[in-house]
Image (cartoon, coloured by chain):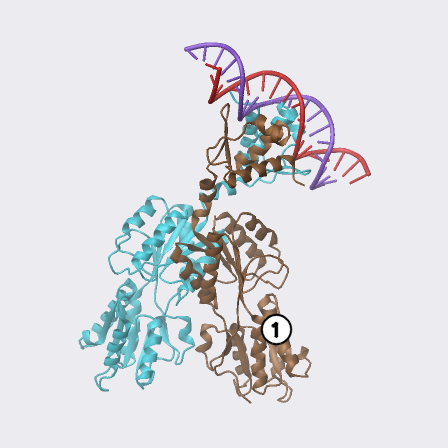
Chain colours: A cyan, B brown, C purple, D red
Amino acid sequence: MENKYEVVEHDIKEKILSGVYKVNDRLPTESELMKTYNVSRYTIRHAIGELENDHYVYRIQGGGMFVDDWQKINDAPLKSKVIGVITTHIADYIFPNIIAGIDRYISNSGYSILISNTQNNPEKERQSLLKMMDSGISGLIVEPTQSALSNINKDIYMKLKDLGIPILFINAHYSDLEIPYIEMNDFEGGRIATDILFDYGHQKILGLFKIDDSQGVHRMNGYINSYRNHSDYSLLSEMIMYQSSDNMHAIFKRIENALLMNENERPTAILCYNDQLAIQVMDLVRSLSLKIPEDISIIGFDNYQLSQYISPKLTTIEHPKEKMGHDAGKMILDIIEEKQDLDNIIYEPELIIRNSVLKK
Amino acid sequence: MENKYEVVEHDIKEKILSGVYKVNDRLPTESELMKTYNVSRYTIRHAIGELENDHYVYRIQGGGMFVDDWQKINDAPLKSKVIGVITTHIADYIFPNIIAGIDRYISNSGYSILISNTQNNPEKERQSLLKMMDSGISGLIVEPTQSALSNINKDIYMKLKDLGIPILFINAHYSDLEIPYIEMNDFEGGRIATDILFDYGHQKILGLFKIDDSQGVHRMNGYINSYRNHSDYSLLSEMIMYQSSDNMHAIFKRIENALLMNENERPTAILCYNDQLAIQVMDLVRSLSLKIPEDISIIGFDNYQLSQYISPKLTTIEHPKEKMGHDAGKMILDIIEEKQDLDNIIYEPELIIRNSVLKK
DNA sequence: ATAAATTTGTGCGTATGTATC
DNA sequence: GGATACATACGCACAAATTTA
C-alpha cells in the first residue's frame, strides 16, 4: 500500500511532469495542500521534502514552494551538452581558428568543447578517444591522425558508434570507416597550385609533401596530375615525400641539395605541403642567398595567418578554417538532434595570389 | 546560530569523517542519540535524514543506522578528470598558447580541457561558469572578464568553492574573492616600458590603455609612475583610456588627432595596452604618412607571435603564455590532489627590444 | 518456530522561529 | 507592522521490519 506522503508526492510529481505545474510555478501552500489531501502538515512536508531532494521542487522560507528546473537537472548527467574535439594540435597553426569556428556555432545551442590533442600520434589519438568515451559527450569531431596510414583505432570508433555517439571527421577521413566528413578538395588544390606555376613559366617545380596524412597525399596527387599534363621531366627527382616521424633535419638537407644545383638544373619554384613548411623553406632559401621570388617561387597551403605578414607575402591555397569549424559544429548538432546522417562537405580550393611567386 | 539538528548532523558527520565511525559501523539508536544530545526524536531523525541524503548514512527499518560508503559515492562525480578553462577568447591573440601550455601539463596526468570563452562579456562568463558547474569538472582555470569592474558573478564563484571545485585565475583576478591567481607584474611592465622610452630621449609619450581589465589599469599605473619620475608635462593630454564597450573608431580618431598635432607638440612615442592594439596603431601611424620608428616609436605588451613578423618588428614586454598555462595546469592539479592552496605566482616583466623604438 | 523486545518508518497536533510580501 | 508561509522543534501513537530471547 502506498503511504499517505507517497500519495501526495506522486500526485504532485505527476502534475509537474504533465505540465499542470510548470517550471517556477508556485505550488499551493502547505495549508492548502493539507486541506486538499486531508492530511497533516507533517505529511505534506515529508512529501515535498522528497520532491525537493529529487530537484522537482524548491522552497523559499516565507516565499512559497516552486517547481524546480527538473528537466535540465535530470538530463544533465546524461546529455551533458559537450562536444569532444580531437585535433593534432591545439594552439598551433590553423587549429585555433577551426576550434573557434566550432565554438562559435555550438555555444549558441548551449554546448561546450572538450578538447584533446594527438600531437600527430595515433597512440595519443587512442587515449583521447577513450577519454572522450568516458566523459559522456554528445558528439565528437575528430581531425584524423596520420589518416593515410592504417587506422589502429578503428575498434574505438566502432565502439563509439555503438554507444550512439555521432562522429564527424574534419580535414581528412579514414577510408575504412563510414563516418561523415568535412574536408578540402586537396587533390584539386595541389593541381591548381601547380598549374599556376606552369602557367607562370616555371618548368622545374620541387614538390614537398608530408604523406602520412591524406591531405598531403591528395595534394601530392594533384601536383603529379598537373605535372603530367605540363611536363616531360621525370617527377621523382623533383619531389620529396616525408612522414612526421622523419628527421626533419635530413629532409631540409635534401631540399638544400636540390637548391644548390647549378642554375639550369635547379628548381625555380617549390610547392610546399602547407604554409608552416613554406615559412621554414623560405628561411632556408634565404640562408642560401637565393631571393624570393626572383630566384625561387614558393606556394603553400592553408592561408595561415602569418602568411600575409611575412615578407614576401606568401601565395597560398585558401583553407576555410573558421567556416569549416562552424560547418562542423552545425553538422554534428544536426546529427545529434535529428539523428540523421547528412552529406559530406567538400570545399573547392581557391588560390590566393600574393608576392612569393614570380611570373617568368 | 546553528540549529539543533545541524549540531547533531555535524557532530555525527565529523565522527564519520574522522573515522570514529567507520564504513558499515552501526550508529547508536535514535533513543540513545536523543539522550546523548538531549533533543527530541524528531531532531535526531531530521539530522540523520540529511546525512542519509548526502550518502553518509543508510538506515534499515528495524535493523539500525549504519555508516554508508561515503568516500566512494562522494568521489565518483569528481573522477571526471576534466579541467574547465574559461578565457575571453579561444583562437585569438595569445590565448591559444596559454591553452596549449595548460594542456601540455594536465594531459600528462590524464586530464582534458573543457573550454569556453566569454568574448569579454561578463554575462557570457556567467553562462560559462554555470555550464562548468553542471559538467562535473575537477577544477577550473579562469581568465577574468573585465576584472577591473565590479564582479557580477561572485555568487557563482562562491557556489563553486562550496562544491569543492578548486578555482585558479590567470592574467588577472577579482580582488573581492580569495582565490589563487597567476599573473604578470603589469605595473612594473608599464613602468619599465615607459622608462626605456624616457631613457631613449622621448619626452611626450602617448599612453593607450584599456581599463576594464586590471592588466590595463596596472600597466597604466606603471606608465603614470614612470611619467611622474621623468617629466613635468601634464599627463592627461597624453593618455587615452578606453573600455571594450567603447566605439573603437572614435578612439582611433582621438589617437589620430594626437598624431596630427605639429611636430613640437605631438608625441614621439606610443605605449600600447597590448600588441594587438599596437599592430592596429602601427597601421594608423603609417596611414598618416608617419614613419616607425623615425617619427613615432611604439611599444606593446605580450610579445604576440605576429610581433616579430611585422615590419618593423615590434618592441614589447614579454608574456610567458605557454609557461603561464603550464604553471596554471600544475597549480590546479596540485590544489585538486593535495587539497591545499598554494602561493600565487607573479611573473616579472622583461623588455624585448626590437625595431619599433628609436633612440633619439 | 514463535513471541517479545527493539529499532526505524509513518503520521498527527501543537508551538515557536524566521523570512517574505 | 502585520499577515502569510516555510523552518525548527517537541511529544505522542502506531506500523513495519529486524533482532533477540
**Percent position (x, y) of residue D9?**
66, 31
The amino acid beneath tag 1 is: Met
In the picture shown, does residue B68 fall above or below A263?
above
**Percent position (x, y) of residue B70?**
48, 39
Q: Residues within 10 Å of mark 1 (few under 14, many from 20)?
A: many
Quadrant for residue A287, please give it: bottom left
**Percent position (x, y) of residue B148?**
62, 64
Can residue B210 be seen here? The reply is no
**Percent position (x, y) of residue A146?**
28, 61
Drawn side of residue B11 relative to residue A149, left or right = right
In front: B21, or B289?
B21
In front: B211, or B7?
B7
In the picture shown, does residue A14 fall above or below A260?
above
In the picture shown, does residue D18 fall above or below B326?
above
Drawn side of residue B8 relative to residue A128, left or right = right
Drawn side of residue B50 relative to residue A200, left or right = right
- For mark 1, what is the residue? B220
**Residue drawn where x is 46% and y is 36% of the image:** B23
Can residue B29 be seen here? The reply is yes
Q: Secondary structure at mark 1?
A: helix
